Image (cartoon, rainbow, N blue to C red):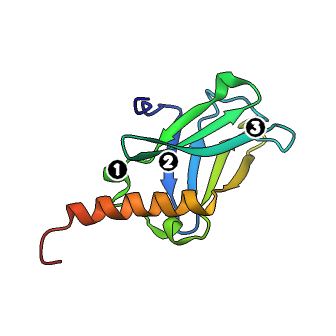
C-alpha cells in the first residue's frame, strides 16, 4: 500500500491533549459526525508511517490521514503524551447555525505506543549530534 495523498479537505492540528482532524464542510456533509452514524478509526502502517484510517457508513467519505513525522516534528507534541492517544474529528456544520460537531476516538494502547515510538524515533534521527 502506498502512502495516501494529503486531502485538501482535511487539516491536521496537533493540540495539547488531542490530535484534531478538521474536515472542511465544503466537502463533507452536515451530520456526518452525528452519534447515529457509525464511524471506525484504526491505524495502518505504510513504509513505517502511521496512517489514521476513518471508515464511515457511506464509503465515499472514507479517508486515510498519514502522520508524517517530518510534518509533525515542529508542532505541538502534548497529544502524544496522552494514554491512550485521543483523536478528534471536527466538522463545522451549516454556517448559519455556527456549530461544530465532533467525535472523539481513543486509539488502542498498542497503537498509541507504536505511533509514539515512530514519531520519537524520527525525532531522534534528526537531532544534531551532541544534543
For numbered disc 2, what is the local secondary structure? strand
Residue 98 location, quadrant: top right
In this view of the protein, can residue 75 be seen by the observer? no
Q: Earlier in the sequence, mark 3 or mark 2?
A: 2
State how far apart marks 1 and 3 are (Cα): 34 Å
User: Which residue is disc 3 drawn over?
Assistant: 96
Using the image, determine if residue 9 lies above or below residue 22: above
CA–CA distance between discs 1 and 2? 10 Å
Q: CA distance from mark 3 to mark 2?
A: 24 Å
* Whether residue 109 is situated above or below residue 93 in the rendered picture: below
Quadrant in the picture for residue 125: bottom left
Q: Is residue 9 positioned above or below 47 on the image?
A: above
Circle 1 or circle 3, nearest the eye: 1
Camera sees residue 50: yes
Residue 71: image tag: 1
Vertical side of 60 occupied by 85: above or below: below
The earlier-in-sequence mark between 1 and 2 is 2
Q: Residues within 10 Å of mark 1 (few under 14, many from 20)?
A: few
- The residue that disc 2 covers is 12
CB contact under 8 Å: marks 1 and 3? no
Where does the image place residue 78, in percent across and percent down from the top left?
49, 70
Amino acid at each position: 500500500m502506498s502512502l495516501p495523498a494529503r486531502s485538501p479537505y482535511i487539516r491536521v492540528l496537533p493540540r495539547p491533549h488531542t490530535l484534531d482532524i478538521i474536515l472542511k464542510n465544503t466537502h463533507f456533509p452536515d451530520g456526518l459526525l452525528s452519534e447515529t452514524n457509525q464511524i471506525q478509526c484504526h491505524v495502518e502502517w505504510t513504509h513505517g508511517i502511521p496512517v489514521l484510517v476513518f471508515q464511515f457508513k457511506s464509503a465515499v467519505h472514507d479517508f486515510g490521514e498519514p502522520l508524517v513525522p517530518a510534518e509533525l516534528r515542529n508542532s505541538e507534541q502534548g497529544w502524544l503524551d496522552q494514554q491512550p492517544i485521543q483523536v478528534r474529528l471536527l466538522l463545522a456544520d451549516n454556517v448559519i447555525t455556527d456549530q461544530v460537531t465532533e467525535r472523539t476516538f481513543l486509539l488502542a494502547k498498542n497503537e498509541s505506543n507504536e505511533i509514539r515510538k515512530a514519531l520519537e524515533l524520527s525525532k531522534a534521527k534528526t537531532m544534531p549530534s551532541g544534543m
